[in-house]
């Protein structure tokens, strides 16, 4: 994993939980999504809300599946 290309690397062990939240978003498991993590992912441009439903952005998809 290249830390320069991984937007979650700066979060250390918390990156694991953020990745799980991203996987929950991708799998549409909305009841599992940690709202604080969702806010952080939106702030980083890795997720977005559409009609009240969280989705991964292209950058989010690339991050969760490539690292």
Image: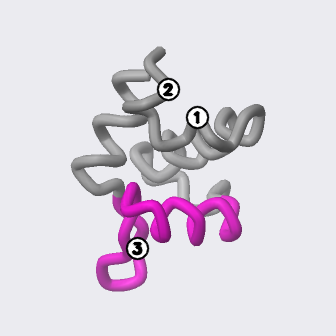
Which residue is drawn at the image coordinates 69% and 61% (left, top)? Answer: 34
**Callout 1 environment at 10 Å: few (<14), some (14 to 19), or many (20+)?**
some
Marks counted in the figure total 3
Depicted 52 relative to depicted 60: above or below: below
- Figure quadrant of the C terminus: top left
Tag of residue 3: 2
Question: Which range of residues does the magenta coloring cover?
Answer: 34-55
Q: Residue 16: x and y, percent?
A: 67, 33
- Tag 2's secondary structure? loop
Q: Earlier in the sequence, mark 3 or mark 2?
A: 2
Q: Are marks 2 and 1 in contact (CB under 8 Å)?
A: yes
Q: Which residue is mark 1?
A: 9
In space, the residues marked 3 and 1 are separated at their CA atoms by 26 Å
Q: Which residue is mark 3?
A: 53
66 or 4, which is in the foreground?
Answer: 4
Q: What secondary structure is marked by label 1?
A: helix
Residue drawn at point x = 44 percent, y = 19 percent: 2
């Amino acid at each position: 994993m290249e830390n320069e290309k991984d937007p979650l690397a700066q979060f250390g062990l918390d990156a694991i939980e953020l990745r799980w939240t991203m996987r929950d978003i991708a799998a549409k498991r909305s009841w599992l999504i940690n709202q604080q993590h969702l806010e952080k992912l939106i702030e980083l441009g890795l997720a977005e809300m559409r009609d009240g439903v969280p989705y991964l952005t292209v950058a989010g998809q690339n991050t969760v599946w490539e690292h």
